[in-house]
Image (spheres, helix red, strand yellow):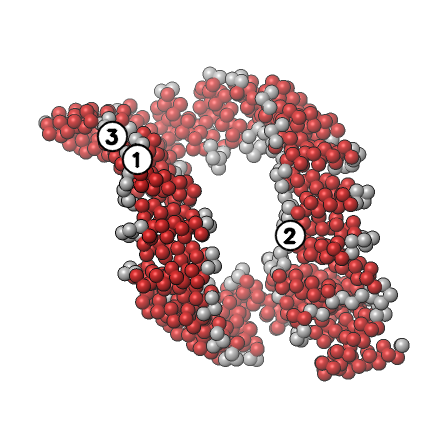
């Protein structure tokens, strides 16, 4: 805990954009017409400016494309250095390892560029953050050598030393950290001094480190660095067994303000330093009080246990009992509870309080986790002491069954002999004697394996793993060892340690085959298949499942073939998956397996576009499987939609909702039906389904209420629409549809002042979600209408950078473009307007003609008459409602020729 490790630099995650958005931006850029009189250079400038704009709006992934295009198309352009540097920065921002090569390329070709200084440092940091310590060290060294006066030079030296530490070269790191400390300002100065000392400690130079840490502590009193230095000094002195001095430094570290984040560790080791120094009372007292000071520490339970055990050793039984009881009040682990109850039982046993002792030992048996044998043994002693011999033997049998420890079994059986002798049970007495004589035979392996299986059945997988391993290691080659090998593989699988599970199963197969047997071979291959499947090794998992299925007499055949089909499906080899599922269907007598195969075959057919065939299988699956396969009904309805039968699909979803019992699937079916009804123009049918979902008050209720409100608004039923939206807004305010309802209400029925309050509340509660983006758009439009143009532009720019819905984005970009046009910012206006007008994907958008008129005005403002005329002629020809305006502008342009 004493060693400071520098935080890895975290690079900001880039904002993701969809492929669709990227294609739109690409189309906009590709369709920009070169400016008259400027030609190719002007086009290049616009491209680079556009890439830079993407960087400024947190879209580095898209900027990468345009930087690449600029570099490839304009390699001799005066701004090529800017493009290459921009590419490197964009790659770095998205976490692309290509940033390293991009920086190197920039530096190779533009070593004298002003950005070269920053590029060298950023290259070094990229190498460091990529774990390339040796290269990072060299790069940081080069930077500090080239630019000794640069503000980042000392930081580079610091990270050069950190890189040396990462490559296990602490002695070299020491010198550099010292140099940095000598030259830097706080806090780097102090941190470097501490790291120099810590590096000496890491190099094994404990005395030198201790001296350096003392200097750090005295040079920077009252700082976190000083406290860390004291803590590490305490560690060094503890290792050197100078416990009294260690206590002094641990105490100084603990007294630091603010408190160090690892103060619990310091306190724990100070307590042990006190105990080791001979001040056992003080040390145990600190451990006993640990939970009060550090209630959330991972050391809490350990500290209390150690304190209680030490008080027992010191003979302070009442103090030990008090701590164990305090431990029981806060401990959640059943294993910890078992330990505490067992120790309390021992303490009361030694104090001759048999009733209390029996109570705590019995609790250990009740917990049924650990110490069962020990507790049973002690209960046997208590019963024997009370002359209840039959009860004593019963408890001792419990203890004997719960352990495979030879020494404990000896003690248990000796005590049983005493009880059986006292009760006159000669037959059982002779059996135990025989058992004691034979206990060193190989049968002991079976006993251990049986104990492992018992532990596994109790859910203690790690405990079972340990016991199975004991059998394998102590009795190699035996039957029990082989069975333990198979069982251990199953435990590894349950613990998600799939590679180790596969290794055990393969070893088991090898052993069994060498013995000429075939017991459990099909099971072993089956579980190998599952292990590989979990690791994503689809092809290899198919090989294993196939091997299991192909073994003569395999009882895993059909199940293995089903799993092979699932693996093929995961590989998207749908035809192969269908072959496996068909084989299972044709040969299976197990209803569950055949139904799974039938459903999965339908999924495969659907993935191949064979919707009709898939639908028949889905329906058959539901008819045969009933409630367990209700999802098949929804999938069957979905296939009708896929082949264009929307009306039949809607009816099928509605029918499914009546047949299904699962409430979430009912909602899903009704919502799909409503969506299709609305698409078909059947508003009444859509409303009927939406209202059924809303009445259920389930997960789909907010969306259903919102849909009702939207639909009723479209039908002119304002009062009913408002009622539904208000319920969604007020009852489900944190849901996306509750927020969307609030937005719609603000848009449709509120005055400007009320709407602004509603928009501001939406933005405040979740500033980055799509609802807030549209709220910013609406606020911008209100500001525009009120004549507050600059405020409107600011809000609309924020909205444009955040909106993902294309129809809303068009509205925002058009409004922003028109305002920028009003401010005579023609180039900025064109970027917004061309997004709508130029993209072929949105040529039928209702806002296209309006954006075209505005775009033509932008070209006119830049005196690009040809471009403006081309746009206006198209609008005059295609859009009658804008024809007059377009013709007027054409006349205006032609009159100026």
x and y, in percent, of residue 754 in the image: 64, 67
Q: Could you classify mark 3 by the number of other residues whose Cα lies within 10 Å: few (under 14), some (14-19), or many (20 or more)?
A: some
Disc 1 to disc 2, C-alpha distance: 54 Å
Q: Could you classify mark 2 by the number of other residues whose Cα lies within 10 Å: few (under 14), some (14-19), or many (20 or more)?
A: some
Identify which residue is drawn at 60% across, 59% down.
Answer: 769
Residue ID for mark 2: 14
Q: Is residue 353 visible?
A: no
Of tags 3 and 2, the one toward the viewer is 3
Q: Earlier in the sequence, mark 1 or mark 3?
A: 3
Disc 3 to disc 2, C-alpha distance: 63 Å
Q: Earlier in the sequence, mark 3 or mark 2?
A: 2
Relative height, residue 309 to residue 847 (above, below): above
Q: Could you classify mark 1 by the number of other residues whose Cα lies within 10 Å: few (under 14), some (14-19), or many (20 or more)?
A: many
Q: Is residue 363 left or right of residue 329?
A: left
x and y, in percent, of residue 283 in the image: 47, 22
Q: Which quadrant is home to the C terminus?
A: bottom right
Q: Which quadrant is home to the N terminus?
A: top right
Residue ID for mark 3: 442
Q: Nearer the viewer, residue 636 or 668?
A: 636
Of tags 1 and 2, the one toward the viewer is 1
Identify which residue is drawn at 15% across, 32% down.
Answer: 390
Q: Is residue 14 visible?
A: yes
Residue ID for mark 1: 481
Q: Is residue 149 left or right of residue 590?
A: right
Identify which residue is drawn at 35% across, 69% down.
Answer: 620
Mark 1: secondary structure:
helix
Mark 3: secondary structure:
loop
Quadrant position of residue 578: bottom left
């Amino acid at each position: 805990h004493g060693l400071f490790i520098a935080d890895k630099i975290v690079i900001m995650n880039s904002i993701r954009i969809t492929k669709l958005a990227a294609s739109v931006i690409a189309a906009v850029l590709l369709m920009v017409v070169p400016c008259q009189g400027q030609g190719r250079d002007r086009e290049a400038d616009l491209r680079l400016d556009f890439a830079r704009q993407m960087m400024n709006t947190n879209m580095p992934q898209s900027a990468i494309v345009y930087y690449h295009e600029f570099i490839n198309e304009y390699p001799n352009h005066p701004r090529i250095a800017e493009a290459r540097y921009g590419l490197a920065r964009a790659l770095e921002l998205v976490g692309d390892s290509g940033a390293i090569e991009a920086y190197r390329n920039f530096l190779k070709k533009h070593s004298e560029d002003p950005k070269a200084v920053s590029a060298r440092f950023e290259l070094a940091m990229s190498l460091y953050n990529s774990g390339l310590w040796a290269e990072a060290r060299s790069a940081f060294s080069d930077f500090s050598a080239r630019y000794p006066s640069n503000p980042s030079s000392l930081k580079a030296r610091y990270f050069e030393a950190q890189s040396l530490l990462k490559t296990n070269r602490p002695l070299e790191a020491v010198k550099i950290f010292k140099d940095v400390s000598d030259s830097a300002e706080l806090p780097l100065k102090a941190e470097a001094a501490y790291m120099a000392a810590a590096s000496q400690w890491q190099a094994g130079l404990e005395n030198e480190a201790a001296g350096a840490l003392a200097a750090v502590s005295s040079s920077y009193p009252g700082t976190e660095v000083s406290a860390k230095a004291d803590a590490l000094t305490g560690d060094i002195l503890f290792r050197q067994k100078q416990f009294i001095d260690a206590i002094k430094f641990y105490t100084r570290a603990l007294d630091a303000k603010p408190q160090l984040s690892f103060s619990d560790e310091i306190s724990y080791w100070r307590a042990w330093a006190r105990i080791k120094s001979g001040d056992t009372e003080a040390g145990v007292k600190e451990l006993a009080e640990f939970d009060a000071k550090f209630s959330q520490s991972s050391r809490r339970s350990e500290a209390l246990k150690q304190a209680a055990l030490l008080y027992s050793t010191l003979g302070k039984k009442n103090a030990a009992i008090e701590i164990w009881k305090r431990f029981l009040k806060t401990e959640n682990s059943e294993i910890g509870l078992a330990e505490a109850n067992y120790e309390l039982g021992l303490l009361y046993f030694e104090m001759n309080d048999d009733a209390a002792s029996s109570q705590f030992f019995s609790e250990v048996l009740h917990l049924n986790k650990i110490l069962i044998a020990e507790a049973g043994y002690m209960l046997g002693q208590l019963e024997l002491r009370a002359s209840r011999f039959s009860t004593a033997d019963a408890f001792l049998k419990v203890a004997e069954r719960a352990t495979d420890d030879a020494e404990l079994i000896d003690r248990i059986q000796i005590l049983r002999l005493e009880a059986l002798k006292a009760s006159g049970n000669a037959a059982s007495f002779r059996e135990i004697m025989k058992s004691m004589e034979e206990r060193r035979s190989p049968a002991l392996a079976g006993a251990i394996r049986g104990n492992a299986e018992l532990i596994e059945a109790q859910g203690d997988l790690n405990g079972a793993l340990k016991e199975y391993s004991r059998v394998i290691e102590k009795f190699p080659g035996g039957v029990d060892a082989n069975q333990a090998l198979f069982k251990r593989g199953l435990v590894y699988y349950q613990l998600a340690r799939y590679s180790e599970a596969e290794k055990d199963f393969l070893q088991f197969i090898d052993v069994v085959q060498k013995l000429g047997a075939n017991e459990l071979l099909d099971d072993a291959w089956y579980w190998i298949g599952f292990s590989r499947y979990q690791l994503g090794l689809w092809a290899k998992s198919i090989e294993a499942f196939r091997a299991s299925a192909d073994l003569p007499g395999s009882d895993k055949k059909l199940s293995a073939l089903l799993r092979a089909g699932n693996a093929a499906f995961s590989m998207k080899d749908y035809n192969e998956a269908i072959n496996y599922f068909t084989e299972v269907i044709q040969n299976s007598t197990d209803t569950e397996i055949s139904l799974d195969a039938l459903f999965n075959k339908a999924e495969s057919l659907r993935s191949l576009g064979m919707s009709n065939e898939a639908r028949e299988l889905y329906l058959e699956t539901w008819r045969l499987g009933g409630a367990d396969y209700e999802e098949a009904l929804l999938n069957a309805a979905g296939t009708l939609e896929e082949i264009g039968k929307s009306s039949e699909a809607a009816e099928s979803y509605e029918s499914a909702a009546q047949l299904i019992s699962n409430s979430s699937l009912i909602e899903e079916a009704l919502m799909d039906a409503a969506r299709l009804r609305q698409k078909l123009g059947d508003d009444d049918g859509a409303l009927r389904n939406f209202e059924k979902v809303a009445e259920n008050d389930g997960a789909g209720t907010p969306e259903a209420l919102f849909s009702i409100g939207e639909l009723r608004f479209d039908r002119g039923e304002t009062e009913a629409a408002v009622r539904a939206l208000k319920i969604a807004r007020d009852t489900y305010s944190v849901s996306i549809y509750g927020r969307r309802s609030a937005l719609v209400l603000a848009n449709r029925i509120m005055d400007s002042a009320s709407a602004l309050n509603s928009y501001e509340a939406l933005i405040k509660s979740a500033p980055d979600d799509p609802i807030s983006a549209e709220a910013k758009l609406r606020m911008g439009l209100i500001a525009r209408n009120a004549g507050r143009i600059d405020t409107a532009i600011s809000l609309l720019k924020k909205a444009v950078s955040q909106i993902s819905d294309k129809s809303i984005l068009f509205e925002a970009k058009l409004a922003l473009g028109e305002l920028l046009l009003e401010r005579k910012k023609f180039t900025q206006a064109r970027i917004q307007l061309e997004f709508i007008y130029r993209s072929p994907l949105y040529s039928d958008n209702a806002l296209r003609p309006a954006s075209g008129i505005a775009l033509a005005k932008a070209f006119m403002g830049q005196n690009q008459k040809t471009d403006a005329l081309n746009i206006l002629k198209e609008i005059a020809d295609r859009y009658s409602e804008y024809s007059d305006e377009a013709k007027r502008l054409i006349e205006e342009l032609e009159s100026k020729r």
